[in-house]
Amino acid sequence: MTKDDRFIIAGLGGAKTLQGEIVIGGAKNEALKVLAGSVLFQDGFTALNVPEIEDVHRLIELLKRLGIKVEHPEKNKYSFDTTELKEFSLPADISKKLRASIVITGPLLARFGKVIFPYPGGCVIGKRPIDLFLAGFRKMGAKITEDGENFVVEAENGHLVGAEIFSKIQSVTVTETFMMAGVLARGKTVLKNCPVEPEIVSLGEWLNECGAKITGLGTSTIIIEGGELLQGQDKIHHTLPDRIEAGSFIILGALAGKEIIVKKCRPDHLDALIAYLSEAGVEIETGPDWVKVINSGREKFTSLDVKTHEYPGFPTDLQAPFSIFLTQAEGQSYLFETIFEGRLNYFDALSRMGAKVKVLDSHRAIIDGPTPLSGREIESPDLRAGLAYVLAAIIASGQSVVHNVEYIDRGYEEIEKRLVSLGLEIKRVSGDDKNELCQCLPQN
Ligand code: EPU
């Protein structure tokens, strides 16, 4: 992967020909937090099914800089040795590229009584403030100063104290940060208005397996009894299947598949997507760990009103891929992004491809369909919108060039190889390489 990688995609022009099986990898948004949680361990642990994606690789680099030893004996398997962890200052170069770096501040502060960190980076999908983190640290007895570049957070008397923290917004990373901070705080921490994402529950269950005392997982109130450093030397963490990756391939199946089977996923984590797609007329079958999408090629999909919501509602991370589906549904669809205010930033390029879309404000849009799309040269603005562009390019007629593939690499492991296995012509090119596929395709 280099910085100017791009995908060249031969569009199917609306044909539904892709066929085969896709095996889903580990959940990005669980793996990142489990890795951040390594700071809570006295010894270390092993994690399996860790996705080999850019965000994970950046976080591992960050953990190494803190003094954690990381072994990578085979693909998707990592072992962490935390016995020499001594650094509590987050390196700016990595933290600024990774939103998940904020999650490590809680465990570091709880372990060392001090943490220094810059404003975190990540996908530009809205304001993404950190006020709730700072308020929570204060509630647990920490003082915060800013030195121009960094936040310096110090716990009074060197240790955090348990507190009751009500979050005015349901936030995934805030909940995870304070759940982990509570593990090493003195006394009881009560988190109120928590979201119930499966990744949060799985993280909590893992910490409990290693000695934490967390109750209320999967409910809006999580209670943590503070205790000692965790022990995981003989423990193995199995990362959940990534429901957003699975959902992205299910949407692909509806748009361009003859028959696509999404394997090693958790259909029970995809209820909202499956309900919406079924309502629109997509034929879906599910088994214990698979989802099959079947198309005869003559289906007509009906328009929908979709509103993103915390789990188990429709995930904001599937909003952009799903809007590509809506461009192919008959009638007018209404899209309401309720979580982030900057997540409709990909509509301009969709219009250029021929979609009839109208952005009403920073949260709402109208999509009229079905409209054939034509291949174009487009730039991914962020991870999920980048994936949406790949879907748009796949159903379009002619060739498309999708730039900024590094965004897509942040969350999807080797996506082009998996798409090739379904029968798509897609090629990654770098630098000065020509924007051409192996076969000579007409340019548009
Ligand atoms: N918020 C605040 N103040 C804060 C923190 C958050 O106002 O201090 C607001 C946000 O601006 C947003 C709302 O709270 O409007 C909810 O955002 P949340 O904090 O839940 O998002 P996040 O924790 O930053 C995680 C995932 C996102 C995913 C969201 C929602 C990670 C690393 N990121 O972000 O994943 O969209 O939850 O499910 O877990 C992605 O994978 O592409 C991605 C962006």
Image (cartoon, helix red, strand yellow):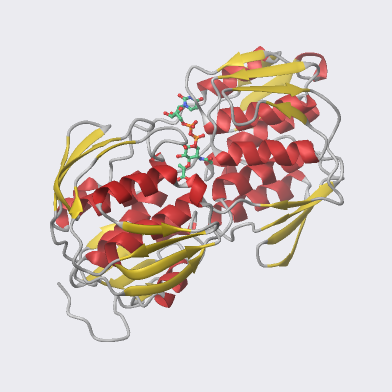
Quick check: 263 above or below 37? below
Quick check: 195 above or below 22? above
Nearest the viewer among 100 and 158 is: 100
**Image-quadrant location for residue 135:** top right
Name the residue at the bottom extreme: 439
Left or right: residue 95 versus residue 61 is left
Nearest the viewer among 22 and 167 is: 22
Query: On the rendered image, what quadrant is the C terminus found in?
Result: bottom left
Q: Residue at x 53, y 40 (%)?
A: 99
Left or right: residue 140 versus residue 339 is right
Q: Residue at x 28, y 43 (%)?
A: 345
Q: Is residue 241 visible?
A: yes
Q: Position of residue 150 (x, y in %)?
A: 60, 29
Q: Position of residue 380 (x, y in %)?
A: 33, 54
Nearest the viewer among 299 and 5 is: 299
Left or right: residue 314 versus residue 173 is left
Q: Position of residue 222 (x, y in %)?
A: 65, 23
Q: Residue at x 79, y 23 (%)?
A: 226
